[in-house]
Amino acid sequence: MEAARDYVAIASDVAASLKRLPAGHDFTVRVLHTADYPVVSLTPRRSYSHFHAENTFARRILILVSQDDCLVAGLEAREFTSLALEVDGARVPQQTIAVNACIEKVDTSGALRMRGPLVRMLVAGYACSLQRYSKALDIASVGLHLFARAQPEYLFARSKENTGKHVLGDSALIKWWQHTLQSALLYAMANRSRGHSSADDSVGTDAVISDTAIAYCVIPGADVKDAPVTLGIQHDSTNGCHSALPAVDWKWGLPHPSEARAHNCVLQFPDDPITRLLAETHAQNWTVALLLEMLAVSEECGSGHRAAYFSAALPIATASPQDSPGTEETADQGTLSYEDYDQVLVKLFDRQMDFSTSDTALASSKLFVDFVDSEFDIAPLVVSTSGPAVAPNTPATTPAAAAPVNDLSSMIRKKRRVAQ
């Protein structure tokens, strides 16, 4: 299964997306990852009326971005590849392969020295890297999932105290993730026609591709009647796409029929509220609709908290024989054992790590980078940005008419009780 992904390509795809940021800045990309390891199925209690055998493998990926030797952003994801064999009533065997990527953590340190959507382009670069599965697996799409929940810090210790960090609340975070996934999906589809990603400008964004990515958003406890027909912005200039390029079709809810048995279809990712709820013995026969109702009153999604589930099917291109990573040897990234990978994460929250100020963030970054580069032979990839400058915020002399936007805050109202 290791041939299914090229970790050189992950760094290269992220570098290519960061290159589009306003010119004049240098960033360093590091990718740390594990090898494939066997895990339980993402639907461990699914019932079958025929023979079914499944093997599921997972890998963990951590992408770190530095500017001027200081860590500024990070993304952690877990990718699952499921190989299944089914024999139906007519005794016809059928093999299926499914790939699902779960973005578990995205964080900033507050030390970024530029104006621009760095984290949004980091997510876009990671989404684009998922196209690499087409080189080894005969699949039409990759699932991209995340649970959006506001938290002051995920990866960088004490970064919530950094005055340069902008911590979003529940509603703002949900809106941000919707726009970020919109941009990431469009960027990945627009750039999938090129043979490989590299940190240069020769990308095939002029090609017209007619595909549409299907994306779902649900906020447990929100009323479906408050959801607009389309949740997303159909064209986002931040990804460098043209209007003729693919769109994202947003839908409300989970990507499963509401009457379906939740255990038969809802993916159960590690450390997820859905997984914890479905692990209860009384949840054996819950429907998808009942699962959402129970999420709405759970500790993580209810009790005054607002959280959202996002799920998308990203169409991927069929690789041509001449496709190659096209990345220099210096961008090679090492493979960590599962234990070493956990050690890296623990190191980020070590007592010595402190991202509360610019000075402590720089000192902590150097300490951490020296540790991973020396212990695990990590060779980073450096990229220089070349995109257009971001226009300064200046007050307009004449008030302009506000463009219509989709406001998710209208969708997160709790259901009103019917008057007796």
Image (cartoon, rainbow, N blue to C red):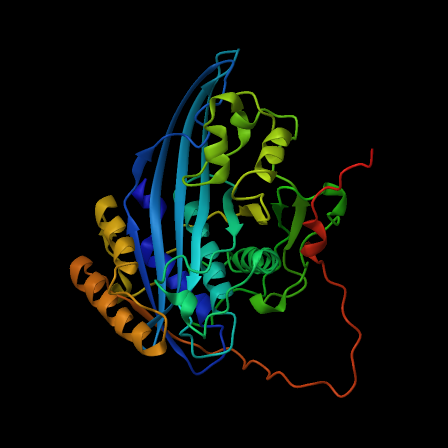
In the image: residue 92, left or right of residue 304: left
Front-most of residues 128 and 73? 73
x then y, percent, for residue 183: 57, 60
Question: Which residue lies most toward the bottom here?
Answer: 397
Front-most of residues 138 and 122? 122
User: In the rendered image, which quarter is residue 402 located in?
Assistant: bottom right
x then y, percent, for residue 174: 59, 55
Q: Residue at x 43, y 79 (%)?
A: 113
Question: Which residue lies most toward the front here?
Answer: 420
Q: Is residue 106 visible?
A: yes
Quarter of the image with the N terminus is top left
x then y, percent, for residue 98: 46, 36
Question: Which residue lies most toward the right here?
Answer: 420
Q: How many marks?
A: 0
x then y, percent, for residue 271: 41, 41
Q: Residue at x 34, y 44 (%)?
A: 59
Q: Is residue 316 visible?
A: no
User: In the rendered image, which quarter is residue 122 located in?
Assistant: bottom left
Give the answer, above or below, for where 395 lies relative to 417: below
Q: Residue at x 22, y 45 (%)?
A: 339
Give the answer, above or below, for where 247 lies relative to 266: below
Q: Residue at x 45, y 40 (%)?
A: 99
Front-most of residues 410 and 33? 410
Quarter of the image with the C terminus is top right
Give the answer, above or below, for where 151 lies relative to 383: above
Front-most of residues 209 and 75? 75
User: In the rendered image, which quarter is residue 58 located in?
Assistant: top left
